[in-house]
Amino acid sequence: MHLWINLEKTIGKEEALKYFQNEIKINDVNSSLWGSLGQIYMDIFSNYEEAEKAFKNAFKYSLNGQYLYDRSRVLMELKKYKEAIEVLLESRKISEQEEELTDAEDIELAHCYIALKDRKNAEKYLEFVKEGIDNIHEEYIDEYKSTLAELENLINKL
């Protein structure tokens, strides 16, 4: 994203986007380029359809679970919660296999199930979120507790 920042400052957003699009045409198997393009579409242009395609390609060429997680966030923005759940479960599986934390996936899974008014599954992932609190660095614990309280509140409204 450093390249994006520099390009945006020197040639503007639209031209910087064209630069990334042209780079992808030259090297369409570069997962980092696809991931950066996905972030640009998502964060800068709020073009979630294009971001979803970019993250899908980024994962295809790297099998990096972060791209699945990013894709799930885009799908949630598009209110495609069932598809987001499928992607999050795949991301969660990879995180578990790599012995990484699943807190981010669990939080988003709870949000998806809340959006679908599926209290049972929302509560299931809320429990995983609660269990994960011991893994959170103290610097982030207040934010984590706030997210936990928000999830509990939303589930109680179902």
Image (tube, rainbow, N blue to C red):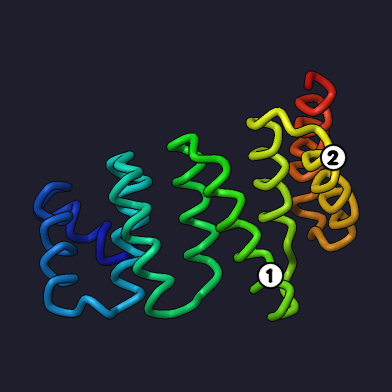
Residue identified by numbered label 2 = 123
- SS assignment at label 2: helix
In the picture shown, does residue 26 fall above or below 112? below
Looking at the rendered image, the quarter that the C terminus falls into is: top right
Percent across and percent down for residue 68 are 51, 62
Using the rendered view, name the quadrant where residue 142 is placed.
top right
| Mark earlier in primary sequence (2, 1) | 1
Residue 85 vs residue 128, the one in the foreground: 85
Q: Is there CB contact under 8 Å for labels 2 and 1? A: no
Q: Which residue type does callout 1 highlight? A: Lys
Q: Is residue 2 left or right of residue 83?
A: left
Give the Cα separation between the discs numbered 2 and 1: 19 Å
Q: Which residue type does callout 2 highlight? A: Glu
Residue 70 vs residue 145, the one in the foreground: 70
In the picture shown, does residue 154 fall above or below 43? above
Using the rendered view, name the quadrant where residue 134 is placed.
bottom right
- SS assignment at label 1: helix
Residue occupying the point 78% across, 39% down = 122
Looking at the rendered image, the quarter that the N terminus falls into is: bottom left
Q: Is residue 33 left or right of residue 108?
A: left
Residue occupying the point 68% across, 47% down = 109
Q: Which mark is residue 93?
A: 1
Percent across and percent down for residue 129 are 82, 50
Percent across and percent down for residue 151 are 77, 34
Residue 51 vs residue 139, the one in the foreground: 51
Q: Is residue 35 left or right of residue 140?
A: left
Residue 121 vs residue 33, the one in the foreground: 121
